[in-house]
Amino acid sequence: MAIPQTLHAEQATRTPANVGAIWTKWLRQEDLSLLTEHPLLVALEDGTASLDVLKRLLAQHSHYSRHFTRYLCALLGQFGDARSIQALLANLREEMGVDDHGHDTHAEMFQRSLRLVGVDPNREPALPATAQLTSAMLAHCKSADPMHGLAAMCLGAEAIVPLIYTPILQSLRHFGFGHEATEFFRLHIEEDEDHALTMLRLMEEFAEDDPARGELGVTIGSEMIRRRVEMLDAVWASTSAPLGAVESRSHNSSDFWRVPSSLTANVPNRLCHPNVMAVSSAADNKFSGERKHRVHIVDLPSHTISMTIGHLEVGEATGAHRHNYETLIYVLQGIGSSVVGDRVVEWKAGDAFYIPPWAVHRHQNSANEECVYIACENAPLLQNLGGIALREELSALHEA
Ligand SMILES: [Fe+2]
Ligand SMILES: [Fe+2]
């Protein structure tokens, strides 16, 4: 694994706009944002992630990265010309510690980090998303068209290493781990390596001969970044369960006998979502786009209630819609009104109001300043009862 200088951590972390021009043709901004704004990576970097979260991520990363030399060998096998093979061999030689620097293999370094941090990947099986990331990487590298493997390895691994390893390094330092435990990550972030650029050059050559292959490379890079994000999502989602109990969060009639006679507090790792409105996450942007007004999602591990912060600009209104969950709204700022069924509720900062299940409603800013409100809903309760939360957009029918 190597770090292209043009995507160095200090430049790239949370500011994918600064990615060197050489990469902008190959890496999609929206994919990089999924990484730079991922709540797990943000929490690792700002020191709010627990040691448990860090260990879970390292265990999953181990299940993926233990196959790194297999990916590389599979890719090498797709090339017939000595020049390309020679170029890619430099990467493999460094992985195996037989380059001029003569250090341990990268696998040995990573194993040392795991031991020092106290992570035993054998006790933490690969999550489905990790297994999918691994098998997709290997499948691309085995593809007869080397563009598949190059794009997957270069765009889906080498080029994004700083975006993932910098938060991990920060978190390791936050918990006081020293030189030995951080060596693997420092090496990959700090060393002036050019493996990714080597792969990029080969991709550029393919794309020059056939632009469609260039497009293919971009698509594969995007796919692999999204698979990586799915692994991060899975790790993050597992963090409200105790270690080793990731699969035990849903219950059915066969385990009714497990109902305990007393309660034990299960305090999740994440108890705080700092600065909710300071950053718009990728999830916020997606949600805001669908709702057609700005929304910040409060990301906390609650199972029964949700919270969002809604914004309505001057003159803005939400679309008419209805849902089978309840909503409580508290107005932080502004003046507006809401149509709720056949009623109209006028509201202002300091007021709270209620939307009952399945009542058609829409909210409107009716003054000259932005409205900001907190909305709490029991959608997670219905979703966790078996995916039975419903929401219907009715704008076209009711906006007249
Ligand atoms: Fe490496
Ligand atoms: Fe609503």
Image (cartoon, rainbow, N blue to C red):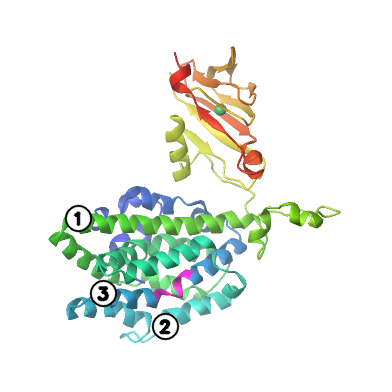
Secondary element under disc 1, as helix, strand or loop, is helix
Residues tagged 1 and 3 counted as in contact (Cβ below 8 A): no
Q: Indicate which disc residue 125 carries.
A: none
Q: Main secondary structure of the magenta part?
A: helix
- Going from N to C along the chain, the mark reached first, 3 or 2, is 3
Q: Is 254 displayed left or right of 377 in the figure?
A: right
Residue 67 falls within the magenta-colored stretch: yes
Give the magenta part as a residue range: 64-69
Q: Nearer the viewer, mark 3 or mark 2?
A: 3
Q: Residues within 10 Å of mark 3 (few under 14, many from 20)?
A: some
Identify which amino acid the numbered label 2 is placed on.
Thr
Residue 43: percent from left, percent from top? 53, 54
Identify which amino acid the numbered label 3 is placed on.
Gln
The residue depicted at 61 percent of the width and 38 percent of the height is 388
- Going from N to C along the chain, the mark reached first, 1 or 3, is 3
- Judge by depth and name the residue closer to the eye, 111 or 81: 81
| Quarter location, residue 389 | top right
Secondary element under disc 2, as helix, strand or loop, is loop
Identify which amino acid the numbered label 1 is placed on.
Ala
Residue 68 falls within the magenta-colored stretch: yes
Name the outermost residue toward the front. Answer: 254
